[in-house]
Every structure is written in C-alpha cells, then in structure tokens.
Amino acid sequence: MQIVETVVEMQKIRRSLKGSVGFVPTMGYLHEGHLALVRRSREANDHTIVSIFVNPTQFGPNEDFDRYPRDYPRDFALLEKEKADFVYLPTPAQMYPEGYNTWIEVNGVTDRLEGAVRPGHFRGVSTVVNKLFNIVQPARAYFGQKDAQQCVVIRKMVVDLNMNLEMIVVPTVREVDGLAMSSRNVYLSPDERQQAPVLNQSLELAKKLWLEGERDSAKIRLAMVDLIKQSPLGKIEYISIADALTLRELEKTESPALISLVVRFGKTRLIDNILLGKP
Ligand code: PAF
C-alpha cells in the first residue's frame, strides 16, 4: 500500500494505472462502515484508492473540525489489512491553496435537512468530492448510506455535471446493538452510548408501522418521538419523512421514502436513516 501526499504525485500515479479505479473518499478515523466500502471497491475494481482528508470547508465555524478524531497510523494499518492500493492524504494547503475560489453548489436538495441546519456544509462536501474525483478519476466511487443526504447531493452532482463515473451507495454498517457506525461515536459518554441505539430502534419502529400499512407521516413521526423520549439523554433535532429522491417532506409516507433523523447526545449530533420502498 502506497501513501500519497500531493496532488501532483496522485495525478502521476493515476496516469500510470491500467484498468479500473475504485475510490473511497473518507475523513479517516476509519471503522467497519468505511472498510465495507473498501471491500466493495476491491471486489469490482483493479485498483482501490482511499482518501483521508478532514475537509475544513464542510465544517461550520462552531462545529467539530479541530476535535474531529484523527489517527492516521491506525487508519493505515486497517487499510493495509484490507489491501487498499493507495491512501491519498492531501493537506488543506494542497486542496485549498492561497487564493482558492471555486465552489460547487448543488441547489434544491441541499436547502433542507442537514443543509438547513449546517449552512455551507454541502457546498464544502460537493466541492471537495468534485476535486477528489478530478484528481483520482475513478470508474466507481463508494459512499455509505448513513449519510443519506450526502448521497443524494453527490448523485445529483454526478448526473448534472455528466461525470464519467458510477456512484455506489453501500448499506449502513451497525454495531451489534444497532447504533450506526460513525467516527463521531467516540464522543459519546458511556451513558450516552448506552442510549444511542434509540435512533435505530425508532427507525425500525417506523418501518414496522409502515409495513403494517401506516402511511400517515405525522403518526409515524409521533410514534418515533414517543420512543426516543424514553431515552432522556437524547434530544431530537429533527425527524424527516421525505421523498427519497427530492427530499421533499411527505404527508403520506409513500414509497420511496427516506426517514432520517438527528438526535443530540450532549454536544454530539447522531444521524441515521432508513429507506422505505425502492428508490
Ligand atoms: O462522508 C465523508 O466522510 C465526507 O463528507 C467526504 C465524502 C469524505 C467528503 O469530505
């Protein structure tokens, strides 16, 4: 496994690669969810490139950019074990040199959910992903369903900008108690960690109601709220029941629907989601 640190070096390596390249963009502090993406890439491609870059432009001024967990030696060891071919590790100065001033804005699907509470977040995500795609030029790129809105936004960018790559969304990987794996789970105190599976439990309850025929979004949301309130350390930020493609809120939970929620545990925002019906 080769570690690559500069744009020029990555582009040079890319030009030398024959066959297909699978790409897994990450912000590091890897967990099983990331490794599932790497495995999928290895199965389908001749080469797998994983980027690790904590992208400053997708964090708001009061968000956790400085304290976002980082452990490169541990990440390298995990990726070596998964037989990733290259780890691309650019610096902020490489990605955003002095005078950098070009941004990708995906409109519509970014003005709600995470986009509404984290202004500028998706502008940072779509810009950095676009830059990474340009540098790595993958045939396939792999993203986790856990960041459902990010998947919708990047898919829209790929389609709208005629990008010559296939975007693959891989199901969320969960801890045994159902908590979605996330690098931010390390922020949770033991008591918060114990109550955090309530996100997944509320989504499973919503799915059960939906499978039993309930289509009234207000009723489904209320049942989720009642369940989450039984875990007093969790404070609901939002529960959205939306069309899975446009992310517009649905009064009737018709397929394909995306139920997504944010629950705060102390300073930690946990997100999770479930898809109902086929998109
Ligand atoms: O999902 C993430 O880890 C990040 O948003 C991504 C896609 C690597 C862009 O910085």
Image (spheres, grey):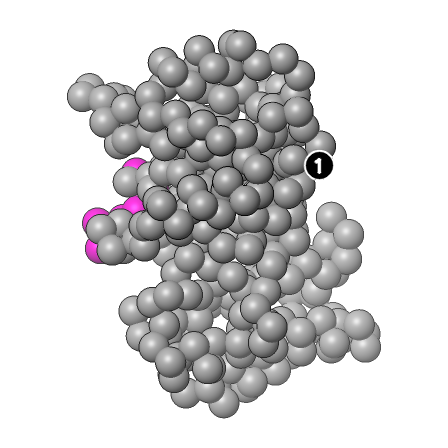
Residue 273 point in image, percent of width and height: 58, 62
Q: Position of residue 51 (x, y in %)?
A: 44, 34
Ligand 1 lies under 8 Å from the Cβ of mark 1: no
User: Residue at coordinates 65% horizontally, 53% vertically from top-left?
Assistant: 171
| Residue 8 found in image quarter | top left
Q: Residue at x 31, y 75 (%)?
A: 266
Quadrant position of residue 7 = top left
Number of marks in the rendered image: 1
Q: Nearer the viewer, residue 1 or 149?
A: 1
Question: Is 59 covered by the magenta stretch?
Answer: yes
Q: Secondary structure at mark 1?
A: helix
- Going 37% across and 56% down the picture, which residue do you hit? 117
Image location of residue 124, percent across then percent down: 36, 37
Residue 30 in view here:
yes
Disc 1 residue type (three-letter): Glu
- The image quadrant that residue 169 belongs to is top right
Residue furthest out toward the right? 212
**217 sits left or right of 103 in the view:** right
Report the magenta stretch's main SS: loop
**Which span of residues is magenta-colored?**
57-62
Residue 23 visible in the current orientation: no
Relative height, residue 197 to residue 96 (above, below): below
